[in-house]
Amino acid sequence: MERLGFSRQQRQLGQTPRKTHLTGSATRLLKDSHDVKERAALEAFIARELYGLSLEDWTHLTGTFTFGSGPTKEELDEIIRQSLVLWGR
């Protein structure tokens, strides 16, 4: 039985949907570390799938990121905003 498009052979080789997702995201981020959409998707995935956070937990946690200014803070705010949008997908 295939689960999430993964064959038995892929699972035997240690490939899992989570590892494949993380590997793909990391590869894309290495090409462009300022890819806000990819970073938001990765942050949401890690929080939800690896740490088991709820949307309420994630909202509370990211709501504490209040310090900073300028382009870096704007990028962080956009990553958080997009991660919240992506959370329900």
Image: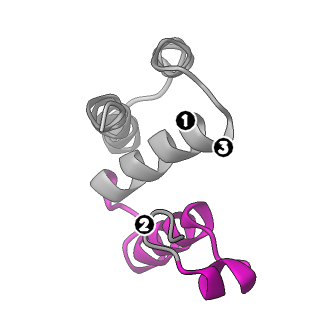
Location of mark 2 (residue): 33
Q: Nearer the viewer, mark 2 or mark 1?
A: 1
19 on left or right of 68: right
Q: Is residue 10 above or below residue 87?
A: below
Check contact, mark 1 vs mark 3: CB within 8 A: yes
Provide the residue designation for mark 3: 50
The residue that disc 1 covers is 48
- Rounded to the nearest whole Å, what is the CA distance between mark 2 and mark 3? 21 Å
Q: Give the residue at x 39% y 30%.
A: 69
* Residue located at (32% from left, 30% from top): 88
The stretch drawn in magenta includes residue 75: no
Mark closer to the observer (2, 3):
3
Q: Quadrant of the N terminus?
A: bottom right
Q: What SS does tag 2 mark?
A: loop
Secondary structure under the numbered disc 3 in the rendered image: helix
Residue 89 horizontal/vertical position (percent): 30, 39
Q: CA distance from mark 2 to mark 1?
A: 22 Å
Say which quarter of the image contains residue 38: bottom left
Residue 85 appears in which quarter of the rendering? top left
Residue 5 locus on image (x, y percent): 43, 71
Mark 2 crowdedness (10 Å alpha carbons): few <14, some 14-19, many ≥20? few
Question: What range of the chain is rendered magenta?
Answer: 7-36
